[in-house]
Every structure is written in structure tokens, then in C-alpha cells.
Image: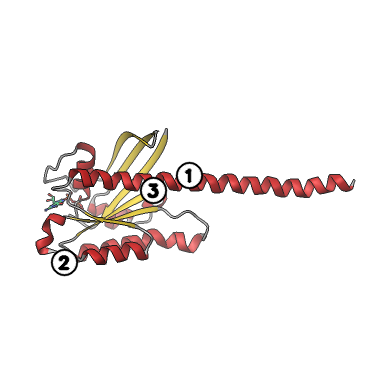
Amino acid sequence: MNDVKLAVLGGEGTGKSALIVRFLTKRFIGEYASNLESIYNKNLCLEGKQLNLEIYDPCSQSQKAKFSLTSEPHWADGFVVVYDISDRSSFALAKALIYRIREPQTSHCKRAVQSAVLLVGNKQDLCHVREVGWEEGQKLALDNRCQFCELSAAEQSLEVEMMFIRIIKDILTNFKLKEKRRSSGSKSMAKLINNVFGKRRKSV
Ligand SMILES: Nc1nc2c(ncn2[C@@H]2O[C@H](COP(=O)(O)OP(=O)(O)OP(=O)(O)O)[C@@H](O)[C@H]2O)c(=O)[nH]1
């Protein structure tokens, strides 16, 4: 069974818990405990594979203080970064979060497989008080090699489910890429050893 670890990050009150609860239960209950951080577990079958999905939902306080974005990039295989389309400051935070996720990946190694990141503009039902344009979200995502969607946890159960499936599929694709790189790396090492020692044997 594959373990898939997903962190749902974003500003306070952007709807992180609402999205996760919607995905897990198909329900929108309106108010969610925000003083607890949680890891939810779900078993699911995708592309013929059994998956053990863990979803990390930070509480706003710990996100600011304890984690401050240093732990999640190491723990998670992928990220959903949420902002509220009716709150510009939450978009600024989403941008900072994306930069922080991408930062260690650009400075480390160019060949490394980049984490799957999906930027979500939540609360689309509040588009009459919209402060962040769809194009702005799309551009931020494109510029940082992220997927993007706008939706409403309050009103769109299917879209929320599709959004989670999309990021999980991206994570699985990354697993395959990493595996391919590992095996081609060990093949080229074997080839190198064979070349060196094979040649020596011939010359003896
Ligand atoms: N109109 C609308 N309200 C939403 C939507 N999603 C969440 N909310 C509301 O936004 C508020 C915050 O939702 P939460 O899910 O607690 O947000 P959160 O990001 O987990 O909040 P913290 O844990 O405090 O950071 C709640 O009152 C939700 O009912 C949505 O799609 N539309």
C-alpha cells in the first residue's frame, strides 16, 4: 500500500478544515475547531492502487509559531495551498507559502522532482465580494509550477473531491518519476562499474 502525505496550508479562516471535511464526509458543517491541528487518515483506491492518505490540517496558531513552514515541506509529499477569493491578505499569504515550499527545491538540486502543489481559491460562492481575480490565482500557479482551481467548499462537493483526487494523482506521478530516476541512477552506476572493472579484466 502506498502512503500519501498531503498538507493543506493557508491563512486563517480560508476554509482548510471545511475542504478536508467536505472531501472526507461530503458534508459542509459551517464551523470547525480551529485550535487543534489534526492528521486525518483515509484509505482509498486510485488507479488500481490502494492508498493510505494522511491529510495534515494545521491550526492557525501552530502554523504561525511552531511549524512556520519549516516542517511541512519535509513531511508532506504534496500541498494544497488555500486562499479565500474574498480576502486579499489570504492571497498574499498563499503566495508566501508557495515561495517557501519551492525555495528549498530550487536551491538544492535542479534534477530533484518538485513537490506537487495545488493552489485553491476557496469561497467562490462569495464572488460578489471578490478581492482576488481568477487570473491572479492562475498566474501565481503558472509562475510557480502549481495546479490551480477556484471552488466553494460550501457549495461544491464534487469539485472538492476532484481537487483532492487531482493533487493525489500528481503525487503518484511524482512517486513514479522518483522511482524511475532512482532505478536509472542505479543502472548507470552498474554500467560505470561494469565499464571500469570489465575493461580491467580484459587487459589482464
Ligand atoms: N461562504 C463560504 N464560507 C466558507 C467556505 N469554506 C469555509 N467557509 C467558512 O469559513 C470559515 C472558516 O472555515 P474553516 O474551515 O474553519 O477555515 P480554516 O482555514 O480551517 O480556519 P483556521 O483553522 O482557523 O485557520 C467558517 O465559518 C466556514 O463556514 C466556502 O466555500 N464559502
N-term-proximal mark, 1 vs 3? 3
The picture quadrant where one finds residue 33 is: top left
Say whether residue 193 is left or right of residue 169.
right
N-term-proximal mark, 3 vs 2? 2
The picture quadrant where one finds residue 24 is: top left
Q: Residue at the spot x=37%, y=43% of the render?
A: 5
Task: Give the labeled residue for mark 3.
Answer: 170
Considering only vertical position in the picture, is 104 above or below 36?
A: below
Task: Give the labeled residue for mark 1.
Answer: 176
N-term-proximal mark, 2 vs 1? 2
Q: Quadrant of the C terminus?
A: top right
Considering only vertical position in the picture, is 97 above or below 25?
A: below
Q: Amino acid at mark 1?
A: Lys
Q: Is mark 2 within 8 Å of ligand 1?
A: no
Q: Amino acid at mark 3?
A: Asp
Task: Give the labeled residue for mark 2.
Answer: 131
Q: In the image, residue 89 lies at what x, y percent?
A: 20, 65
Is residue 76 visible to us here?
A: no
Q: Residue at the spot x=54%, y=46% of the render?
A: 180
**How many numbered circles does the render carry?**
3
